Amino acid sequence: MSVAEQKGLSLLEVLIASAILSILVFGIVQSVGSLAMETKHSRDRLTASLLASGLREEILSKPLRDPNQPPVFGKEPGEYGNVRIYFDDRDDYDGLEDNPVTDLKGNPMPGMERYSRTIKILRVSEDDPQKEDKTGISRLFLYTVVVRKDGAEQTRLEWLEARP
Ligand SMILES: [Ca+2]
Ligand SMILES: [Ca+2]
């Protein structure tokens, strides 16, 4: 092998090696990037599910029926607004839009400015809880809490409640 051939080969080797190296580095950078994105997404989802279960606990701490007046589904007469400290039964929460997320007194929660929560309470068929009950007879209710960040759904928490 001549000196020139040896030089040519080693140049080719260097080129191949650097190509392989750049592919490897690109791959590593990509996986680190997607790992960081994945971590961020799981953190968002965790925050969202904590916000959802926090609201669920809050609702479950309220009585089934309004203690002060003849109960109606939703807010009773004279009840209005989104300040939850005044909610005195579970279905007062129906249709709530907590955007941005607030505490019981209606103060925005620090650091949660980009999150929002909604809740729907639906009377559903006792035979098929996937179906809305329009007769008003069923005693089964489906609660759905949705938590969003920047408008994009992060988590959805659903539970059924059978009322006596
Ligand atoms: Ca009510
Ligand atoms: Ca009420």
Image (cartoon, rainbow, N blue to C red):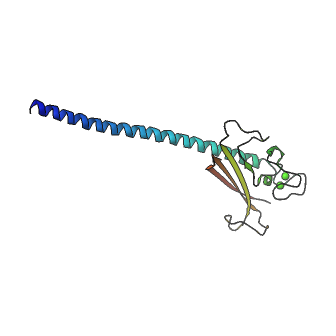
Q: Quadrant of the C terminus?
A: bottom right
The percent coordinates of residue 41 (x first, y second) are 55, 43
Is residue 41 left or right of 162 when viewed as pictured?
Answer: left
Front residue of 9/112: it is 9
Q: Quadrant of the N terminus?
A: top left
Ligand 1 picture quarter = bottom right
Up the image or down, 127 lies above or below 81; here it is: below
User: Which residue occupies the extreme top position in the image?
Assistant: 3
Give the image quarter of residue 45.
Answer: top right
Front residue of 17/146: it is 17
Is residue 31 left or right of 56 when viewed as pictured?
Answer: left
Instruction: Report the residue at 69% width, 35% height from top.
Output: 110
User: Which residue occupies the extreme left position in the image?
Assistant: 1
Give the image quarter of residue 122.
Answer: bottom right
Instruction: Report the residue at 66% width, 64% height from top.
Output: 130
The percent coordinates of residue 33 (x first, y second) are 46, 39
Up the image or down, 34 lies above or below 69; here it is: above
The percent coordinates of residue 92 (x first, y second) are 80, 53
The percent coordinates of residue 97 (x first, y second) are 73, 50
